[in-house]
Image: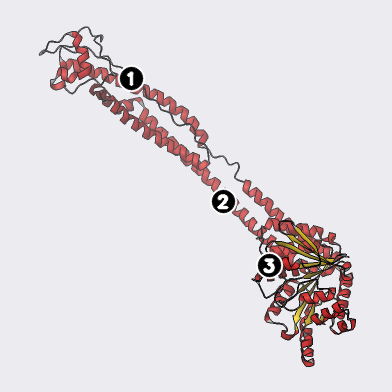
Amino acid sequence: MQQPEIYQDLTNNLKSALGILELDKNSQLYRDTTSICDYLAKPTFQIAVFGPFNYGKSTLLNAMLGNRALPIDLVPTTGAAIYVNYGEELHAKITLKDGTEVSEPGTDVLKRYAILDDNRQMRDDVAAVNVYCPHPFLKTGVELLDLPGTNDRQEQDNLVRDKLLTADLVVQVLDARKLMTLGERENLRDWLSDRQINTVVFVANFINLLEPDDQKQVYNRLLFVAESFRSNLPNNISNIYRVDALPALRARLKGDVAAAQTTGIAAFESALQSIVAAQQEQLAVKLPRIEVIATKICQFLRVKAETVAAEIATAQQKQKDRVEIKYKAEKLISKGFQASVSDFEIWLYQPTLLRRYQSEMALSLQQGTFDAWKTKFEQDVLKQQQTIAEWVNKACEFFDKEQPIALLISFPPAPQIALPEPPPAPARKTTDSQVAPVAIATGLGWLLGGPVGAAVVGGASYILNKRTGYEKPPESPEAYLKQVTEICNEAAKNYLARFSTDTFSMVQHYKEVAAKVICFQDSQEPLKVNVQQHQLQLLNNLAENLEQELATIQVRL
């Protein structure tokens, strides 16, 4: 009997190859490979019977079994692949895709599950159809496979093509009245010859309906075709048989042995028994079709290995280029950041800051518009902040770093100003107790008038205090304005000086924070290449293992 265990390593490697190649499960190579793996694992000797619909396949098998075990009709009926194995009594089992099994005595259940409906469609919930029959030929470990008719629907043709790959012996039924149609010739080439399925027996049906001269012509034509499909058959066994299937079935059902002899069924059965006996001990019959599939898988593995190797080389070059770009980017970003910080520090330099903003701020204090000045000043500072932050943001984005804390800049509180007592107004007599409240409410411009009307003290934030440190009030509005201007200038100077000192300190701290971000670290990028290198090694190992297993099997056989 066959020894499937010698193919175990080959089967394992083929299944592993399917996994790493990630082939489409509907592709022909994927289906062929899974079929060949199943073929190598099964212990039975399978004889598959195929041909176009209405050629008498099921009738031929029924004649061999001596029973109407399989459905036959004048329309294409067999919609599923029906496996016929030995059983103590005739019964059928239907396995549905949800795992449900329907098992009944006889084979009437096939009419509900295994034949085409009125629309010539097969039920889509059927996973397997099995018939068990008490026939001595099946008891020897033989499994018969009744395949759907070809040249009817594409789905049935695909099923037949796949199943033929797993058969140890193929029986092709022909119609002697229309021998070797174009479709049949194409099937011989594409389904059998090209896949190294070379163990084929041809059965010509309906030959009894031809004239004697025509019968000889048909037989001679068959001789030429059949010669290419007997490479693994015993030399003394023909692979061309005439069997009148329907007369043979009728004779068997009646128990008419003599009538059955005239139909050719006995000679055909005898040949099958001899072929099975010879091939059950001859493992080499499997090798040609195994080599075809395994060689294709090896080619796919090698091609994918070349592709992965090229991807690795490309990835390594890209990685090298990317690292160089990021190092260059680090230098450019660092240079830009340092330049922007340097510009800000120059802007913050106290003499520069005073020269640019002191007079404006002092004037805003006098005019009561400090809040407006501060808003404009904060906008200028914000522009400096944004310029610096842009470089840090670029570093975070380019080097995939988290954003650090922002450059925090705080502004000193608004100046608290004490002004001297204004000079008395010559035109009006006002008590001392009225001066401060009036000044706060109306501003100095109303009080002093004339050329100093524009000089006012800004808002409630600035405290007017009659105790100014001067021994006596200024004698004129001009002197008073000068004193106010000096006080506002000093307040602006102190404010800007404090802002400069505090912000310089903040900038120094932020430079340390930013330095950790503007830094490229090459750590995790090689991970993908490492995975691909492992994949490449696996592809090459599988290809080598498959080639070695094939060579080992050839030696053992």
Cα separation, mark 3 vs mark 1, equals 96 Å
Residue name at image x 21 percent, y 16 percent: 439
Q: Amino acid at mark 3?
A: Met
How many numbered marks, from 0 up? 3
Q: Amino acid at mark 1?
A: Asn
Q: Are marks 1 and 2 in contact (CB under 8 Å)?
A: no
Quarter that holds the N terminus: bottom right
Task: Indicate left or right for 188 with 332 as reference.
Answer: right
Residue 237's disc is none
- In the image, 259 versus 429, the foreground residue is 259
Task: Indicate left or right for 409 with 457 as reference.
Answer: right
Q: Earlier in the sequence, mark 2 or mark 3?
A: 3
In the picture of the structure, the residue carrying the numbered disc 1 is: 494
Cα separation, mark 1 vs mark 2, equals 56 Å
| Residue 376 at x, y percent in the picture | 31, 31
Q: Identify the secondary structure beneath mark 1.
A: helix
| Residue 306 at x, y percent in the picture | 65, 59
Residue 351 seen in the current view: yes
In the picture of the structure, the residue carrying the numbered disc 3 is: 122
Q: Quadrant of residue 425?
A: top left
In the picture of the structure, the residue carrying the numbered disc 2 is: 318
Graded by Cα atoms within 10 Å as few (under 14), some (14 to 19) or many (20 or more), the crowding at tag 1 reads: some
| Residue 320 at x, y percent in the picture | 57, 48
Residue 298 seen in the current view: no
Q: Identify the secondary structure beneath mark 3.
A: loop
Examine the rendered structure and indicate whether residue 406 appears above or below residue 220.
above
Graded by Cα atoms within 10 Å as few (under 14), some (14 to 19) or many (20 or more), the crowding at tag 3 reads: some
Front label number (3 vs 1): 3
